[in-house]
Image (cartoon, grey):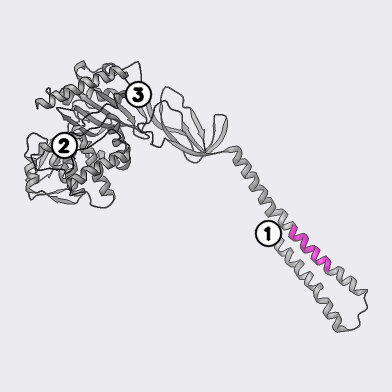
């Protein structure tokens, strides 16, 4: 414990000097997290200042607020979100379902009895649904429930951690490395959890930016996650001898001490090295945002569990007051930057309420100009396809021209050809009358081509009528 506190203190000092040397990276330079929180009428102490804080738009990943977002940090139990992301991916792939039953083993029961790490009372031989284990992982932050889920996805504990790291790399979490599935170092499991190929005493490492990236993708791919995190109190195995009830550690949820309207998730995490962290999400009207607070307080003062929430609420209030996600343009004809364009669909984006949105037209797509960078440069920005109205008119004129050709010119051509063919017949007949016909048989042979002309002529006239009316 003392060693953990010492390491945490050293990291805090390093983080402090990093901030001094690089400057506070804030989306709004005139305010820092302390000023913002006090302006939101929360009484907070400098000693509890977060090491990192961040808000992003959950629709396209724009950064709406940031401080210290790239500082390396221990996520503690927020690591469980990556385990659950792999669980939800597996469910989506059809590998198992929320109602799939898992029987607790004697090893699981033993892990559940380790006092030093957060747990629930897992009982050997009892069946737990995946749904129940997800709730136990998210709300009481049960380490044994987390390990049981990880083993369901991949029985080899080391390979599962490898999957976590591969997923992090795929998402662009470039400062993240996992050594275990739950956020508690493997050595804390007293030999019951041993991910091969990873140092058991090591703590997971990430940053506020990386946690925002992970949460952004989690909500995009599996928005149902908030159904597990929105309640202030949950009960598992209800009506059985193994029933347990838990209070959520997210005190910004409705009904909790720092309740903030719209908050419905996600996960807290704390440890001697990490101090107190939270990743949360909230929705107001159509605007959904993701907030990260890391490194609040000191592990020695367990009230840090509460100290993180005024900071979270303050950055949430800031984001909701200043930004909104809404429909900016309707599908169809619009005039943008002096050009008349036609949008393929309605256009939605997150914009600053205090500014008129400005638009960019590029390569057939329309976007909003924004000073807010993306949390990950590889994320697709909000955009909609369009085409130029002048070009559309030109195309329509071409189509009309072709239509005229089809409806008038072509019928006239066929009509003219038909009349010409019939005229040829009468010319031939007139010519023949001037000739002396010696035999009746010879007359019949020479008259056949002339009647062929009249047949073709009437055929052309019929085609011209059909082309005109069809």
Task: Looking at the image, tell me whether mark 3 or mark 2 is earlier in sequence order.
Answer: 2
Q: Quadrant of the C terminus?
A: bottom right
Is 95 left or right of 141, judged from the image as shown? right
Residue 278 lies, with reference to residue 421, above or below; the image says above
Res 193 label = none
The residue that mark 3 highlights is 321
Callouts 3 and 2 close, C-beta under 8 Å: no
- Disc 3 element: helix
Distance, label 1 to label 3, CA atoms, is 64 Å
Callouts 1 and 3 close, C-beta under 8 Å: no
Q: Quadrant of residue 467?
A: bottom right
Q: Position of residue 398 (x, y in %)?
A: 65, 46
Q: Quadrant of the N terminus?
A: top left
Camera-side mark, 3 or 2:
2
Camera-side mark, 2 or 1:
2
Front one among 6 and 415: 6
Res 467 label = 1
Q: Position of residue 307 (x, y in %)?
A: 19, 22
- Disc 2 element: loop
Instruction: Rate crowding at label 2 as few (under 14), some (14 to 19) or many (20 or more) other CA atoms within 10 Å.
Output: many
Query: Does the stretch in magenta take in 299?
Result: no
Distance, label 2 to label 1, CA atoms, is 75 Å
Instruction: Rate crowding at label 3 as few (under 14), some (14 to 19) or many (20 or more) other CA atoms within 10 Å.
Output: few
Callouts 2 and 1 close, C-beta under 8 Å: no
Task: Looking at the image, tell me whether mark 1 or mark 3 is earlier in sequence order.
Answer: 3
Number of marks in the image?
3
Q: Which residues are magenta?
A: 413-424
- Disc 1 element: helix
The residue that mark 2 highlights is 141
Q: Quadrant of residue 226?
A: top left
Query: Does the stretch in magenta take in 414?
Result: yes
Q: Residue at x 79, y 69 (%)?
A: 453
């Amino acid at each position: 414990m003392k060693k953990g506190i010492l390491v945490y203190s050293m990291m805090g000092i390093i983080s402090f000097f990093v901030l001094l040397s690089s400057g506070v990276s804030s989306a709004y330079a005139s305010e820092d997290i302390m000023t913002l929180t006090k302006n939101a009428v929360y009484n907070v102490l400098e000693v509890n200042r977060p090491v990192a804080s961040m808000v992003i738009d959950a629709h396209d990943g724009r950064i709406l607020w940031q401080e210290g977002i790239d500082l390396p940090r221990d996520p503690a139990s927020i690591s469980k979100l990556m385990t659950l992301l792999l669980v939800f991916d597996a469910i989506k792939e059809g590998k198992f379902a929320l109602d799939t039953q898992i029987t607790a083993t004697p090893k699981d029961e033993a892990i559940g009895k380790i006092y030093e790490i957060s747990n629930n009372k897992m009982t050997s031989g009892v069946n737990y649904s995946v749904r129940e284990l997800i709730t136990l992982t998210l709300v009481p932050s049960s380490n044994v429930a987390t390990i049981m889920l990880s083993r369901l996805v991949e029985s080899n504990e080391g390979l599962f951690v490898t999957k976590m790291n591969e997923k992090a790399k795929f998402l662009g979490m470039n400062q993240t490395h996992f050594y275990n599935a739950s956020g508690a170092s493997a050595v804390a499991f007293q030999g019951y959890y041993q991910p091969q190929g990873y140092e058991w005493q090591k703590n997971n490492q990430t940053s506020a930016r990386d946690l925002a990236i992970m949460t952004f993708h989690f909500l995009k791919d599996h928005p149902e996650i908030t159904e597990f995190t929105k309640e202030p109190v949950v009960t598992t195995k209800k009506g059985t001898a193994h029933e347990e009830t838990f209070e959520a550690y997210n005190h910004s949820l409705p009904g909790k001490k720092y309740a903030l309207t719209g908050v419905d998730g996600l996960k807290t995490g704390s440890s001697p090295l990490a101090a107190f962290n939270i990743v949360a999400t909230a929705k107001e009207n159509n605007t959904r945002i993701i907030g990260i607070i890391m490194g609040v307080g000191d592990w020695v003062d367990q009230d840090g569990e509460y100290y993180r929430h005024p900071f979270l609420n303050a950055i949430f209030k800031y984001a909701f007051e200043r930004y909104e996600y809404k429909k900016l343009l309707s599908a169809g004809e619009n005039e943008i930057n002096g050009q008349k364009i036609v949008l393929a669909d309605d256009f939605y984006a997150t914009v600053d309420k205090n500014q008129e949105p400005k638009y960019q037209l590029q390569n057939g797509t329309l976007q909003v100009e924004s000073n807010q960078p993306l949390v990950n440069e590889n994320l697709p920005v909000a955009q909609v396809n369009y085409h130029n109205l002048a070009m559309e008119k030109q195309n329509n004129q071409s189509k009309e021209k072709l239509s005229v050709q089809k409806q008038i010119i072509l019928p006239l051509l066929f009509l003219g050809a038909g009349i010409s063919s019939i005229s040829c017949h009468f010319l031939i007949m007139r010519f023949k009358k001037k000739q002396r016909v010696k035999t009746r048989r010879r007359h019949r042979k020479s008259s056949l081509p002339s009647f062929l002309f009249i047949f073709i002529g009437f055929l052309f006239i019929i085609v011209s009528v059909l082309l005109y009316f069809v």
